[in-house]
Image (tube, rainbow, N blue to C red):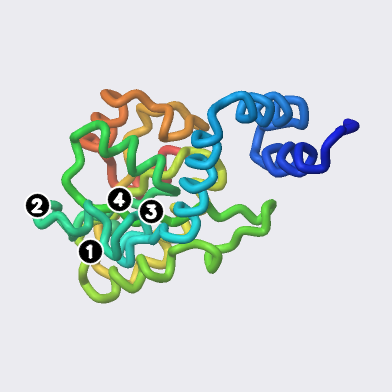
Amino acid sequence: MEFSSKLLENAVYEVSQLPGIGKRTALRLVLHLLRQPEAQTKNLALALQNLRSEIKFCKKCHNISDTELCEICANPKRETSLVCVVEDIRDVMAIENTGQYRGVYHVLGGKISPMDGIGPSDLNIATLIEKAKAGEIKEIIFALSSTMEGDTTNFYIFKQLEPYAVITSTIARGIAVGDELEYADEVTLGRSILNRIPFENSLKSEQ
Ligand SMILES: [Zn+2]
């Protein structure tokens, strides 16, 4: 792609670094921004800048938050001994939308995936085990998507939890295998949390 302006080329390059955005789409978006009032582009740039410089991760559950403790962990009405293990904030949002869950979360920040070079130490697993060790957790609900990486991660954590008196359960598979949690409809997802099954049972049914 030949550009008449270095400034335009730089902007297109940066936008094209986003997932799913090719050079052509990036050019279309950048030209769109140029046609908008200057303030709009400045607001966009500022919002992204603030996001990166001011965002925090909840020190308890690792969810994205504006404060040290996220709103869920800081809510005294939540049952802190019931912990739902999820991949990222999108899963937290999906489960919160069901209105069926009163426990707290633990956000792993990904799934174990040897193919992508992601091992247990790259994820927020150690802090979860620490909480179990400290006796802070009564039950852990695995709510990772039912992909091979999700199953591997569940099993790894399950094994790590063995020395501690923690009940482990998994959301019922009303959700089709391979479906990402964030796309499950609220009713199905809400029901699958209420009808969760012991984690051991999910292992037996797969053999
Ligand atoms: Zn939190």
The extreme right residue here reads 2
For this orientation, the residue located farthest to the bottom is 134
Q: Which mark is residue 137?
A: 1
The CA distance from mark 4 to mark 1 is: 10 Å
* Element assignment for label 4: strand
What residue does disc 2 label? 77
Tell me which label, 4 or 2, sits earlier in the chain.
Answer: 2
Label 1, secondary structure: give it: loop
Q: Quadrant of ligand 1?
A: bottom left
Q: CA distance from mark 4 to mark 2?
A: 16 Å
Mark nearer the N terminus (3 vs 4)? 3
Residue at point 53%, 42% (across, down): 42
Task: Kindly state the secondary structure of the residue where label 3 is placed.
Answer: strand
Crowd class of label 3 (few under 14; some 14 to 19; many from 20; radius 10 Å): some
Query: Which residue matches tag 4?
Result: 84
Residue at left 29%, top 46%? 198
Identify which amino acid the numbered label 2 is placed on: Lys
- Closer to the eye: label 4 or 2: 2
Q: CA distance from mark 1 to mark 3?
A: 21 Å
Question: Where is residue 89 shown, x and y percent of the image?
Answer: 40, 46
| Pointer 2 with pointer 1, Cβ within 8 A | no
Tell me the CA gap for discs 2 and 1.
16 Å
Mark 3 Cβ and ligand 1 under 8 Å apart: no
Location of residue 65 in the rendering, given as x and y in whole percent from the top left corner: 34, 55
Q: Respond yes or no on whether mark 1 lies under 8 Å from ligand 1.
A: no
Question: For the residues carrying marks 1 and 3, which lies nearer the camera in this image?
Answer: 3
Residue type, numbered disc 4: Cys
Given the image, on which type of amino acid does mark 3 rest? Ile
Q: Nearer the viewer, mark 2 or mark 3?
A: 3
On residue 64, which mark appears? 3
